[in-house]
Image (cartoon, grey):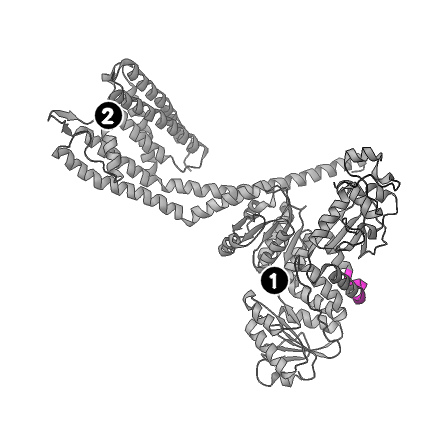
Amino acid sequence: MGNPLLTFWARRNRREEEERRARRARLLASAASANRASETVFLVLRRMRAPLIVLIAIFSISVVGLTVIPGQDAEGRPWDMGFFDAIYVMSYTATTIGFGEIPYPFTYNQRMWLTISIYLTVVGWAYAIGSLLGLLQDRAFRSALALQQFTRKVARLSEPFVLIAGYGRAGELLGHSMDALGRRVVVLDRNAERIDGLELESYHGDVPGLAADARDPGHLGVAGLDHPCCEAVVALTDDDEANLAVVMTTALLRPDVPVIARATTDVMAERMRVFGSPSVVNPFDLFGDHVQLALRAPASYQLLTWLESGPGAPLPHRASPPRGGRWVVCGYGRLGRELTEDLRAEGIDVTVIDPSPHDDVDDVVVAGGYESGVLAAVGLEEAVGFVAGTDNDITNLSLVETARRTNPTLFLAARQNVPSSAPLFAAMELDALLVPTEEIAHEVYAQLSTPLLWRFLRDMPALGDEWAAQLVDRLTALCGQHLQALWKVRLTEREAPALMPWLASGEARLGDLMRNPEDRDECLHAVPLLLLRRDDATLAPGPDALLATGDELLLAGWPAARRALERTLIVDAVREYVVSGRRVPSSWLWRRLAGTPTADEETGDRPPAPTPS
Amino acid sequence: MNLEKVVFGFFVLLAATLNFGFFLGDMRDPDLHNPYELFAAVVVNLIALVLKFGDRTQIGAVHLATSIVAVLQLVGAALMYGYAEYVSSAGMTEGWTSSVVSLSGGALLANLVSVVLLVIETVSFHRG
């Protein structure tokens, strides 16, 4: 195809074709699950057929019987019961209300028929009502109702939301962090108990949850994969295969939505990367990297974990793993393997203890570690670090305690597998603790909360330990021991209208902006973490950093500082005071009286009286 | 032979025939319209309605719709009949009778559509 115009058209058509295909697949996926919901309703109707027909038949037979049997009126004259009377009598008799013999006392003949009818109709009613109540209790029916309710809730979402497939411990932590940021979350999990538990948790926003298998594209479709407001999909199930299925479904049906998936092996991570460009999180790999970082730069590691923990997190303890000396790693599973590799890459001697022999690693002692004498035999007295990394919490706890008895100066690290053992590990006062689920939740939070935080965390280790230590000191001095709020500010016409003339002057310094609008001599209780201008990021910009229109700022600090800064960005008079110290009138009338056409051209004359905005 | 189809066809047809039987005769003469026949038509139409529950096909949906129409009209006719007999002091006058019969005539039309649908369904069914 030589003609460029033809090439253009062909390409355009191909793109359109692809878009159409994706749209069609999306529609099919959601239609499949919607069909399943209505199918159950039809099933219920179908199952009510027999009881209803029995009821109608019994009722009509008894009514006809009553109208046919001759009766008597009050004076003993022959009288035939009409249809209305018969239906009336049968209605109150069948439903066991029993008003008596209306309109005239019955003859024996009528009473005989009524006796038979009572038994027939009561059985008929009981059968119909029993079937109906049974259907309402039916699991399939209830899940169909839940699915419909969930579909409605998700369809009504009108703000961006994150779809979390797999609501385990990691999903829960992530959900709460996102909720604290004011972001919406939709949850999918196979375990109905986890979904039922959603109602008891203290979320600010409403979190729609569905108990369904995330491997089914239909379920993902119902959970909002095809919703225009879906901003990201997170696959956090404990089954790697299911996570792969989620990555696949999203890549095929919504190529424009970013995916973050949990994978515990490299092979699975590779398989996931075949589909688009998902962000794969491997908790063990991550822990290895973190230990490496902690070995090189304890303060950087401290800052990283603090910022990753989400709003309200206390400043973590600055652990400094010893570099010179030998480490002992107990358990050579997925964690042990990663950790040993990372430690050896740092040039540290590692002795591995594992119950089963391994050929791919040197210096392995085949033992459980808890046998008497094993720890002494591997020379724990001379070692500097000990890691209990088996997948059994009881074993890990006992290993750590034994190691501490043998050598009290050891640097102790352990892996916590189930949330319920958290108090035990806390009581042990370890130097480092790996909780795989928390590790994942923090990493995903860092990626999702704002792109600026993710950028900061990636660039931060390169600046060294000294720099990180200073930043931690600045943060704790200004904002205290707890991470309060983390937010982003865009210096654009829309978000910072009051700042525009000041930014255009070219003399806009960050230090002037970070002042308290009540008293400009006091600085704002917030630290700018990152300044992003197009693609250039400046980490922790100083007070002299020059600002320009279109810059993005990431700040950490008190929520009150956030509100104060917002006022500076929006109200002209506040900005003028904060930046230059001049009080200018903010209301239209006072501005007219003071004769100032625009606030920024003020010459320094004090207005007659400062007016609050 | 499918017993379910036999039962279904039987009730649909019986609903139409009973309805037709009640409708037949001078519109103004109450003696020509037997209340027992109206009662039977209501009951059989109700059963036909319940039998049509839970069919997911397009033709099943139209079947259900026709039955609902027929039942509504017949119940309306029965209510008017009851009102004329028990509440109104004049009894079954010509006016009341013709109202009841014309309502049942509407139901008859719906029932005929139902029968036509049944025939179409049968004709369009190919073996193998």
Q: Nearer the viewer, residue A17 or A577?
A: A577
Q: Which residue type does callout 1 highlight? A: Thr
Kindly identify the residue that appears in the image at 64 percent across and 73 percent down: A430
Q: Secondary structure at mark 2?
A: helix
For disc 2, the marked residue is: B36
Q: Is residue A494 visible?
A: yes
The chain that hosts pointer 2 is B
Residue B120 disc label = none
Q: Which residue type does callout 2 highlight? A: Tyr
Instruction: Identify the main secondary structure in magenta.
Output: helix
Number of on-image labels = 2
Q: Is residue A210 above or below residue B91?
A: below
Q: Nearer the viewer, residue A548 or A443?
A: A548
The residue segment tinted magenta is A460-467
Where residue B46 appears, as percent x and y from the top left, is: 33, 32
For disc 1, the marked residue is: A437
Dot 2 surroundings within 10 Å: few (below 14), some, or many (20 or more)?
Answer: some
Split into 4 quadrants, where in the image is the C terminus of chain A?
top right
Where residue A426 appears, as percent x and y from the top left, is: 60, 70
Q: Are marks 1 and 2 on the same chain?
A: no
Kindly identify the residue that appears in the image at 56 percent across and 54 percent down: A202
Dot 1 surroundings within 10 Å: few (below 14), some, or many (20 or more)?
Answer: many
Q: Is residue B1 visible?
A: no
Q: Secondary structure at mark 1?
A: helix
Q: Nearer the viewer, residue A318 or A54?
A: A318
Question: In the rendered structure, does residue A202 fall within the stretch colored magenta?
Answer: no
Relative side of A154 to B87, left or right: right
